[in-house]
Image (tube, helix red, strand yellow):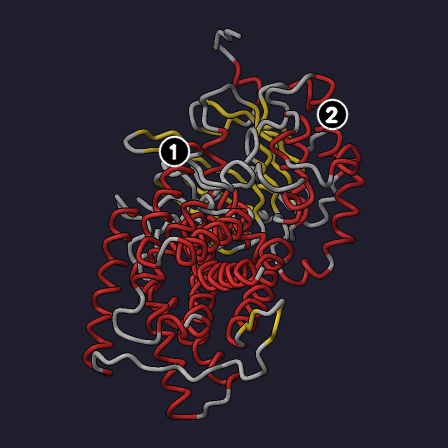
């Protein structure tokens, strides 16, 4: 029982952190046709933003979270300004933007190294309430806080996407770019909204996952890979699919770490992803939900 | 008398192909205008040029005295959202609907300002009075609907915004005659106020008696008499 609860808590908290990242990647691809590898450095910058605020301004948890979210949203703005707006109508846009966003990761890493040095920084703890004892398993406050925060934010994102006018416009753009233009949807403005929302979610993820990754110039690469894998597994463009995929990958990671060994986590995860994509090339959500065709 | 929509020496086309040749057209406020012509004579291209969707275009298009056209040799679609937001609704041939959204969501995407978004319920109700068959289908994904129903969704969407000019491209295309007549009737019920509606069609009987003015279109130019557009052409259907 204790093992089961521990694995479950671990699953949910990993799913929370990675899910926040994956949704940004998935939304960006399906609405803008941009596979945003710079989501990694967005995560990295947001971690430093939260750390800087926590050490230089105030360790107030709310302030630290906001600092991470704002840094993430701002980085998203920079990415859309560099890797989308200037090149969106050029030939081979998917490959060009892929290259540029990959380059942004490398440039960003060098900036972080030069400004802050190679040493990892510790973001102050955000959740300071007591641990919870569930069936004899002690759940640390950062785990509970992570799960609850991510659940609330993901639900809010889903409602925004389904109910609000700007969410509706993003979905219109995903399904029929010309039809969207005919009802007055601006590609540029939608791009900025999507990238700032994605960046903010990545920023929140960076603050929530800080117990695992800290803030260091290279800490973004593993979260980026997990986010990409979840977005692919969930079917690019499907928010419910991404959430389900985050839970599946979280369970695989937690289960593997517990019963097989932490060093085998990537083996089981990739085996799972390859298996699912062989059987269902459009991922879990690909048939449930609207997705952009890859060749469009 | 100046027009709501004034087109002066418009040429437009795709790649090396010129489809619209030096076309002049004035659409007056409050009128229903039909443009008759056979397939391939530029009706759709004319509408697409007004929305900035052709590969290139030259000449002037004034909407309420403001230039929305001008010379453009590349970047189709770059200005489309701005032209649409300024009050030109293109209700395209077939449909440019969003297949994964429900009927209600599709229709709501037609709202073009945040002010109207706040009053969207009332606006939706009055649009549904024009298309009563859509009312029981509001929660259905559009991808699963019939051609006539999709056409109605596409038309209803165009009526949700604060539009001044409605460009309706072959509303009867592909529909059974009875359904086509129903769609045309519904278009006749739309209150134009200071706006205007331009309908492109191939079938004269369907529109006769319902329009204020009928023009012909032949080889990318407007003919004053609709009969000219069909003169001397052997029709093979």
Is B130 in front, or is A126?
A: A126
Q: Is residue A283 in view from this perspective?
A: yes
Dot 2: element: loop
Please tell me whether residue A178 is drawn above or below residue A51 in the rendered image.
above
Dot 2: few (<14), some (14–19), or many (≥20) neighbours within 10 Å?
A: few
Q: Quadrant of residue A44?
A: bottom left
The structure residue drawn at horizontal position 56% and vertical position 63%, both measured from the top left corner, is: A2
Coordinates of residue B133 in the picture (x, y in percent): 78, 32
Is residue A194 found left or right of A133 in the rendered image?
left
Tell us which disc is closer to us: 1 or 2: 1
Is B204 in front, or is B76?
A: B76
Is residue B192 found left or right of B34 in the rendered image?
right
The structure residue drawn at horizontal position 24% and vertical position 57%, both measured from the top left corner, is: A100
| Furthest residue toward bottom | A57
The structure residue drawn at horizontal position 48% and vertical position 7%, both measured from the top left corner, is: B234
Residue ID for mark 2: B209
Estimate the spatial distance between the alpha carbons at disc 1 and disc 2, rounded to whole Å. 60 Å
The structure residue drawn at horizontal position 62% and vertical position 69%, both measured from the top left corner, is: A134
């Amino acid at each position: 029982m204790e093992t089961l609860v521990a694995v479950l808590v671990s699953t949910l908290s990993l799913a929370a952190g990675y899910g926040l990242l994956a949704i940004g990647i998935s939304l960006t691809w399906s609405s803008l046709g941009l596979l945003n590898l710079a989501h990694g450095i967005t995560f990295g910058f947001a971690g430093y933003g939260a750390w800087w605020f926590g050490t230089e301004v105030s360790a107030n948890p709310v302030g630290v979270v906001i600092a991470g979210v704002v840094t993430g949203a701002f980085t998203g703005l920079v990415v859309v300004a560099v890797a989308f707006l200037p090149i969106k109508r050029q030939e081979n846009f998917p490959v060009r933007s892929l290259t540029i966003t990959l380059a942004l990761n490398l440039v960003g890493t060098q900036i972080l190294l030069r400004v802050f040095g190679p040493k990892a920084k510790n973001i102050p703890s955000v959740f300071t309430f007591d641990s919870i004892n569930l069936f004899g398993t002690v759940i640390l406050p950062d785990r509970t806080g992570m799960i609850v925060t991510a659940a609330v934010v993901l639900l809010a994102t889903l409602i925004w996407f389904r109910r609000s006018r700007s969410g509706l416009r993003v979905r219109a753009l995903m399904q029929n770019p010309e039809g969207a233009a005919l009802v007055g949807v601006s590609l540029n403005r939608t791009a900025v909204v999507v990238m700032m929302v994605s960046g903010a979610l990545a920023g929140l993820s960076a603050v929530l996952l800080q117990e695992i990754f800290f803030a260091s110039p290279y800490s973004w690469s593993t979260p980026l890979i997990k986010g990409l894998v979840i977005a692919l597994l969930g079917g690019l463009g499907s928010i419910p699919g991404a959430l389900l995929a985050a839970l599946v990958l979280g369970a695989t990671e937690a289960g593997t770490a517990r019963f097989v060994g932490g060093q085998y986590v990537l083996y089981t995860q990739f085996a799972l992803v390859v298996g699912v994509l062989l059987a269902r090339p459009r991922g879990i959500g690909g048939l449930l939900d609207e997705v952009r065709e890859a060749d469009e | 008398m100046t027009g709501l929509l004034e087109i002066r020496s418009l040429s437009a086309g795709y790649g090396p192909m010129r489809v619209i040749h030096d076309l002049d057209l004035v659409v007056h406020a409050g009128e229903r205008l039909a443009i008759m012509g056979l397939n391939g004579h530029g009706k759709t291209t004319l509408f697409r040029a007004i929305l900035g969707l052709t590969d290139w275009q030259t000449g002037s298009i004034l909407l309420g005295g403001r230039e929305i056209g001008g010379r453009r040799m590349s970047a189709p679609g770059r200005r489309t959202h701005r032209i649409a937001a300024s009050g030109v609704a293109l209700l395209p041939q077939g449909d440019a609907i969003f297949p994964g959204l429900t009927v209600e969501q599709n229709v709501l995407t037609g709202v073009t300002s945040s002010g109207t978004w706040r009053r969207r319920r009332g606006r939706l109700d009055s649009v549904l009075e024009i298309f009563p068959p859509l009312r029981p289908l509001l929660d259905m994904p559009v991808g699963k609907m019939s051609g006539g129903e999709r056409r109605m969704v596409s038309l209803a969407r165009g009526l949700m915004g604060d539009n001044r000019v409605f460009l309706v491209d072959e509303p009867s295309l592909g529909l059974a005659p009875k359904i086509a007549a129903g769609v045309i009737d519904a278009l006749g019920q739309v209150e134009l106020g200071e706006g205007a509606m331009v309908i492109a069609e191939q079938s004269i009987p369907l529109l006769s008696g319902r329009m204020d003015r009928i023009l012909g279109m032949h080889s990318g130019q407007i003919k004053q008499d609709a009969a000219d557009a069909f003169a001397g052409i052997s029709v093979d259907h």
